[in-house]
Image: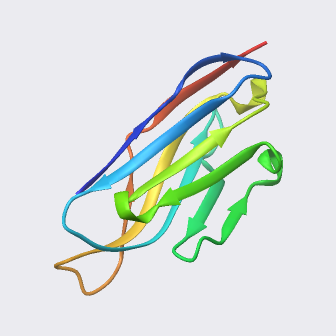
Amino acid sequence: VQLQASGGGLVQSGGSLRLSCAASGRIRHIVTMGWYRQAPGKERELVASISQSADTNYADSVKGRFTISRDSAKNAVYLQMNSLKVEDTAVYFCKAVLMLVTDFGTRTLWGQGTLVTVSS
């Protein structure tokens, strides 16, 4: 089982990017999916998360600019990032809390990270 993230890149301040992340493998159930980011010299922080019932949670710094969504049929999560700022520059990681068909409990998986660079 793995998480594959994509969609990062270089964009000017005020621009938009859309990140995608899909889980593959013998998955029984995905509880939550989310996006975290880590800027140089800083700790990894939550950007946004979404539950199986589509409840969302956002960091204050991205509220009103970023939108998280998921496609349960595709085991995928997306992050639409609008009005990007230089301070949004970071490596973005997707995370999933899920159960495999062979599991009796949940496990946490991290994607490989995708770099988002916002220029002024």
Q: Position of residue 30 (x, y in %)?
A: 39, 71
Q: Is residue 72 visible?
A: yes
Point out the image quarter for the C terminus. Answer: top right
Q: Position of residue 84 (x, y in %)?
A: 75, 29
Left or right, residue 23 beside residue 92 = left
What residue do we see at 38% from left, 40% from top? 112
Left or right, residue 3 beside residue 68 = left
Farthest front residue?
73
Tell me if residue 99 comes above or below residue 14 in the rendering: below
* Residue 41 quadrant: top right
What residue do we see at 25% from left, 87% from top? 104
* Residue 66 quadrant: top right
Q: Position of residue 115 (x, y in %)?
A: 52, 27
What residue do we see at 60% from left, 70% from top? 54
Tally of numbered tags: 0
Q: Position of residue 12 (x, y in %)?
A: 72, 15
Tell me if residue 64 comes above or below residue 51 in the rendering: above
Point out the image quarter for the N terminus. Answer: bottom left
What residue do we see at 37% from left, 50% from top? 22
How did the renderer colour the structure? Answer: rainbow
